[in-house]
Structure formats: C-alpha cells, structure tokens
C-alpha cells in the first residue's frame, strides 16, 4: 500500500466525523449559515438595497430577498464584471465561471475566495466517503484521469474567467497532481477528438484506476481505446475500479459503459455546479446524494407546482418533505441571492438529507451536458423560418439521438411536421443549427469539439402529432407536446 492509500483512510475518517456533526444538526446549521451570509454581505450594494441589516430570521429573509434567475441578478453581475467591488459579496470574486445562459447568452457566475474551497472539497469528500465506506483506497496510488474542459482562462478587470472544470483543475491538491492525467498541455486542447486521441496516447501505457467525466464523453474515450487495442477496458486497465460522474443522467449510458469495460465497477455520482458544489453520493448502499448543508450555501426549496405562481411557497431545509418535486434555490458565499439554478430535486431521505435530481423546472435537453432549453429551440426555429419564408410549420419536438442507428456521432433530432416544407431541407437544418450554437455556448462547444454532430431533421407525415396525442388520450384542451425532451420516449412513439 502506497503513502496516498495509507493516509487516505485516517483522513477519510476525520472528514466523515466532521460531516456527521453538522448532519445531526442540519436545520440549525443551515439557519445559522443564513444569518452568517447575510451579516457578511450587509455592506454590499445588494445587501444595502435589500436591507440585510433588518434580517433576523427566515421570514424576514424571504420578505427582503426575492427569487431571481440570472436575468434578475444580471444588473448586479454586470457591475462585478465591470470591475466594481462590494456589489453582491464583499470585495471582488476570484473567478467567473463562464456558463451557458438562457435569454442572457453567456453567464458569468462569481466564485469567491470563500467559496472556491467548497468546490474543491466537495469532490475530495465524495472520494473520501467512498474510501471510508468501502475500505478501497488503493486506487489513489495509481493513475487518475479527469475528462474535463480546458483549464485555460481569460481575464476581465483582473478576474480570471473560465469553465468551472478548468478553474477547479488549477486547485487539484498537490498529492494528487503527480498521478493526474491528462497532462496540462493536452487538457488545453480545444478540439475534442484530437484531444481524445492525445489522452489515449498518454493513458494507454499507464495503470489507470479512476476515471471521471460526463458519461457520453467517457464512452467515447472507451470506444476509441477499444478501436485501437481490440480489448475491453478491464483488459487495458486491470486496476480500473472507480468511475466518477456527474452532469447528466447515468442510466441511459450505464449498460453500454459497463459492456465496454467488461465488468461492473463502483461508481460515485457528484452534483457540482458553477454556483456551488451541491451534493455527492456518500454511500454505495443508500439511494440519493447527500445535500451539503455546511458548504457555504443556504438552500431554499419551492414546490415545483408553485414555482410559476406570483408568490410561491419558499421552504428551508427543516420544512421539506419526502418525494416532493422542488425547484432548488441557492444563496451563496459568492453573492448569489435567491438564485434559482433551474434544477428540480426530490428528497429520498431526511436523515441525512439526501436528494435525487429530478430534472429542470422547464423542459430541456442535456443528454450531453448542453442544457438546451425550450426558448432556445423556439428562437432557432423562428430564425430558420425567417430565412425560409416558404415554410409553414405544424408542430415540432426535439430529442437526443444518443446512439444513432446509422452510426457516427450522436446528435439532436428535430421531429418536424411541416404544412409546407422548406425548398432546401439541408439549408433549413443548417440555419437551425447555426442559431442554436449562437444561443447556447455549451451546444456550440459540443459541436466544435466534435462530441455532437450537427442536428438532423426528420420530417413527419401529416397528422403525426395529432395521432400521437390521440394515442396518449391528450388530444385537445390544454395538452401540449413537450417542445423538447431529455430522452427518446416521445420521439420514438411519434
């Protein structure tokens, strides 16, 4: 047993012991954190305008701080991006995590000196929880690969700007840096396919024990290795024993991943976001992810059925119930207040508080981490129809094609019923794709990185959507075909 594996076990025991202290007093921990966050930010522009000095309890907190999405906080964020201090949080942030917006285009999510450690420790503690429960620490002595975005960053008024995974890459602990792959230069490559080939060059000779990444990206890595070697992954990396993932639903990929590996391996799910490290799988035996209630974020929960009401119910952790679909709201030590992240969660345990991610508060596609929403596909369709005025549209829906029957890269399939079809369907599809890449930076990254191929249109027969709604008993009234889906259930039935 190497030094890393040896020291990991007592360190894991210490971390878990500290965690259990706040787990036992989770509600008190959260309410105390709420007061601390408010106190720290009381002299900021946002704190003054929202009378933080008057907030003494959660009821007053709800009265003074409205629920926002990014658009609601954008005027404050723009001041921070312009270099102003003490706007949402004291001083200036250390970083901006550049992420995809909805109506906003690119979003700049602040990461402060107070919050960066929680982003790092969340991933660390997920591994240590696994070590503590299973006793398996030997993987830490071998090579670890993190398939992530480029760590290269730009600057805005002295603040580093980059993708969250790239920012976090700069903070990998020194004791793991020496056995981390890929190399920094390889990680900075932009083209995903070229980068993947280079990663394979670097990893094939190594004794890989842990692989981390978004499942479809990892699957592509496995496929390339099998093509090059003709072997299952277990025969290429005999000590590969831990798979860490997050960002998309694992289930559609599970069977193919394990078939590629040639055996089942332990998996650890994480729930990181630019806004904060929210949760991780703390047990191989229990359902759900442990919600991190002592990590610089005060959480609120809005029942999804109430979300779009003028004054929705807002609950703290002590008021939630099992099995209810909640919109997740975050108040962070980087200055996000009443921030609706867009995800929905359900509690599967209240002792400790464990969640499953149930979806998005609005329909979406994120089969590959792209977070394409309804508004974006609507705008893309509007743009294409303006470019092709002959087109008359009946209805459309969009779904991911994860494993194309014709082979090749996955793509978004647009199932469209035209009253009058475009004169040039390929040009129409190209215009749709062009607009969508402009609207969604994640989708653009996946296209330019050769992870997805450009979207494809399947023109449907007349009455296709009517026939589908009839078959579901939902024809007429207020029933609608979802504009997009994160799986192919609707698409395949249509």
Image (cartoon, helix red, strand yellow):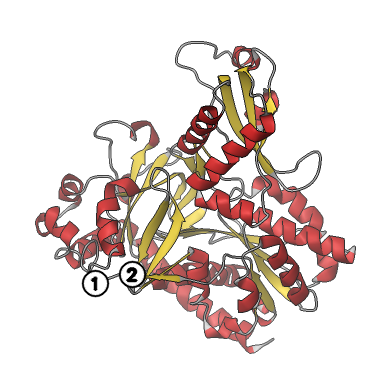
Query: Which residue does the numbered mark 2 point to in the structure image?
Result: 112
The residue closer to the viewer here, 313 or 207, is: 207
Answer few, some or many: residues within 10 Å of disc 2's Cα (few below 14, many 20 plus, some between 14 and 19). many
- Reading the chain from its start, which is encountered first: label 2 or label 1? 1
The residue closer to the viewer here, 245 or 162, is: 162
- Relative vertical location of residue 297 with respect to residue 403 in this rendering, above or below: below
Quadrant the C terminus occupies: top right
The residue closer to the viewer here, 384 or 395, is: 384
Answer few, some or many: residues within 10 Å of disc 1's Cα (few below 14, many 20 plus, some between 14 and 19). some
Q: Which SS class for mark 1?
A: loop
Tell which residue pokes out farthest to the left in this image.
Answer: 54
What percent of the width, then of the height, locates residue 186? 65, 74
Does the image show residue 365? no
Occupied quadrant, residue 223? bottom right
Looking at the image, which residue is at 52% across and 66% down? 165
Quadrant the N terminus occupies: bottom right
């Amino acid at each position: 047993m190497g030094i890393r594996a040896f020291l990991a076990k007592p360190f894991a025991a210490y971390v878990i012991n500290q965690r259990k202290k706040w787990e036992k007093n989770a509600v008190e921990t959260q309410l105390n954190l709420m007061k601390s966050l408010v106190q720290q930010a009381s002299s900021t522009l946002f704190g003054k305008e929202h009378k933080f000095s008057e907030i003494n309890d959660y009821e007053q907190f709800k009265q003074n701080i409205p629920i926002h999405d990014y658009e609601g906080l954008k005027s404050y964020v723009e001041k921070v991006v312009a270099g102003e201090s003490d706007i949402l949080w004291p001083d200036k942030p250390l970083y901006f995590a550049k992420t995809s917006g909805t109506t906003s285009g690119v979003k700049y999510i602040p990461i402060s000196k107070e919050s960066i450690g929680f982003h790092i420790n969340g991933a660390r503690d997920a591994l240590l929880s696994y070590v503590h429960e299973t006793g398996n620490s030997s993987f830490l002595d071998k090579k670890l690969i993190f398939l992530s975005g480029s760590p290269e960053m730009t600057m805005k008024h002295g603040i580093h700007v980059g993708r969250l995974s790239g920012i976090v890459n700069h903070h990998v602990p020194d004791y793991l840096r020496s056995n981390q792959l890929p190399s920094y230069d390889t990680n900075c490559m932009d083209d995903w396919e070229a980068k993947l080939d280079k990663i394979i060059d670097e990893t094939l000779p190594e004794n890989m024990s842990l692989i981390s990444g978004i499942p479809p990206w990892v699957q592509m890595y496995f496929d390339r290795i099998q093509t090059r070697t003709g072997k299952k992954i277990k025969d290429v990396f005999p000590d590969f024993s831990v798979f860490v993932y997050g960002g998309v639903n694992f289930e559609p990929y599970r069977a193919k991943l394990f078939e590629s590996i040639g055996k089942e391996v332990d998996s650890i799910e994480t729930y990181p976001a630019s806004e904060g490290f929210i949760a991780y799988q703390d047990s191989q035996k229990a359902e759900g992810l442990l919600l991190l209630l002592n990590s610089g974020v005060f959480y609120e929960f809005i029942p999804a059925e109430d979300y779009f009401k003028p004054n929705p119910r807002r609950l703290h952790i002590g008021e939630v119930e099992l099995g209810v679909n909640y919109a997740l709201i975050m108040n962070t030590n980087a200055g996000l207040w009443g921030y609706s992240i867009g995800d929905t969660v359900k509690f599967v345990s209240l002792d400790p508080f464990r969640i499953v991610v149930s979806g998005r508060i609005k329909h979406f596609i994120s089969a590959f981490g792209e977070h394409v929403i309804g508004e974006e596909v609507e705008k893309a369709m509007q743009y294409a129809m303006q470019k092709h005025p002959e087109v008359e549209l009946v209805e459309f829906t969009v779904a991911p094609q994860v494993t194309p029957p014709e082979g090749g890269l996955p793509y978004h399939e647009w199932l469209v019923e035209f009253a009058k079809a475009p004169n040039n369907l390929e040009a129409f599809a190209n215009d749709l794709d062009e607009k969508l890449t402009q609207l969604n930076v994640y989708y653009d990254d996946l296209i330019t990185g050769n992870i997805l191929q450009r979207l494809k249109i399947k023109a449907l027969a007349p009455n296709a959507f009517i026939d589908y709604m009839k078959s579901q008993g939902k024809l007429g009234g207020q029933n609608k075909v979802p504009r997009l889906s994160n799986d192919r259930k609707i698409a395949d039935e249509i």
